[in-house]
Image: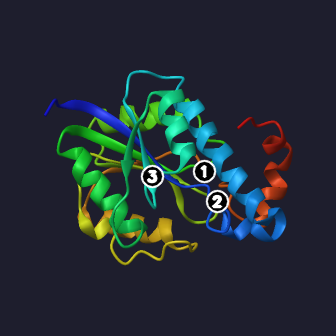
Amino acid sequence: MTYCLGKILVFARAPVAGQAKTRLQGLLGAAGAASLQAKLIRHTLDTLAQQSDRPVELWCAPDHLHPVFACCAADYSVSLRQQFGDDLGERMANAFAQTLAGCQWAIVVGTDCPELSLEDITAAAEWLSGGADAVLGPAEDGGYYLIGLRRTAATLFRAIPWGTSGVLDTTRDRLRTLRWHWQELRLLRDLDRPEDWRHFEDWVAQLHG
C-alpha cells in the first residue's frame, strides 16, 4: 500500500426521490429534493476540484451504483467507495479506520454545506499536518459539516444523537475525554431544513447539475 499524507472523503447519499433531503420534501417535493441533492454533490466536488494536492474519494450510500455517482467519478476523476455500517457514526468510523491505515490524516465532509470553501479544507489539512488530533467544522444546527482526524477512536462516533442539535457538543465532550487536541473552523450553515432553504434559495437557483 502506498502511504499518502492525507485524503478528503466526501460522504454522499444517492439522490433518490423519496430518500434524499427528506426534511425538504414538503417544500420541494420528492423529485425536487433529490435534484437538490444531486446539485449539492456536484457543488461540493466543484469546490474540491480547485485543489490537486489531496486525493478526493466519494463515499456513497446506500451503494455506489446510482448514475449520478458514475458521472461524478468520470467528471471529477474521483474514486468511488461504498459506505458500510449500521448508522452514520459506524460508517464514518469505518471510513476513517480504512483510510488512516494508509494516510497520516483524513477529512470527511458531507454535501449539505454550500458555504464550505477551499480555504476551510486547506486550514483543516494544515492543522492536521501540523499535529492536531482532530478538526471540526461546526454547523449552525448543532452538528458539524467537517471532521478531520489523525487517529481513530470508536467512542467519537458511538451513541451520538445524529440528526439533532446535540451532535457537535457531544463530539466535543468525547474529544475532551480522549484528551485530544483539536481545532475548529468557522461556523457555517447547512442546507437541510425548510428554514435553510429560505436562506439559500437564490443561491440554489444559480447551480448547475
Circle nearer the N terminus (2, 3)? 3
Q: Amino acid at mark 2?
A: Glu
Place of residue 7 in the rendered image (x, y in percent of width and height, measured from the top left): 34, 36
| Coloration of the structure image | rainbow
Q: Quadrant of residue 28?
A: bottom right
Is disc 1 placed on a helix, strand or loop? loop
Picture coordinates of residue 33 (x, y %)?
Answer: 73, 59
Check whether the beta carbons of the residues at disc 1 and disc 2 lie within 8 A of each other.
yes
Mark 3 secondary-structure assignment: strand
In the rendered image, the quadrant that contains the C terminus is top right
Q: Position of residue 144 (x, y in %)?
A: 52, 57
Q: Do residues under tags 3 and 1 come within 8 Å of each other at their CB atoms? A: no
Of the two numbered discs 3 and 1 in the rendering, the one whose residue sits closer to the viewer: 3
- Which of discs 2 and 3 lies nearer the camera? The answer is 3
Residue kind at label 1, given as amino acid type: Leu
Answer above or below: position of 104 versus 140. Answer: above
From the viewer's perspective, is residue 41 above or below residue 14? Answer: above
Residue 150 in view, yes or no: yes
Q: In the image, 7: left or right of 60?
A: left
Q: Which residue is mark 2?
A: 140
Question: For the point 36% across and 73% down, which residue is it?
Answer: 86
Asked if the residue under mark 3 is in contact with the one under mark 2, i.e. CB atoms within 8 Å, the reply is: no
- Compared to residue 26, the image places residue 49 above or below, namely above
CA gap, disc 1 to disc 2? 6 Å
Query: What residue sits right under mark 3 in the picture?
Result: 60
What's the residue type where badge 3 is placed? Cys
Asked whether 154 or 12 is in front, the reply is: 12
Q: Which mark is residue 159?
A: none
The residue that appears at 72% across and 51% down in the rendered structure is: 35
**Which label is found at residue 187?**
1
- Residue found at x 45% / y 61%: 62
Instruction: In the rendered view, tell whether residue 208 sits above or below residue 132.
Output: above
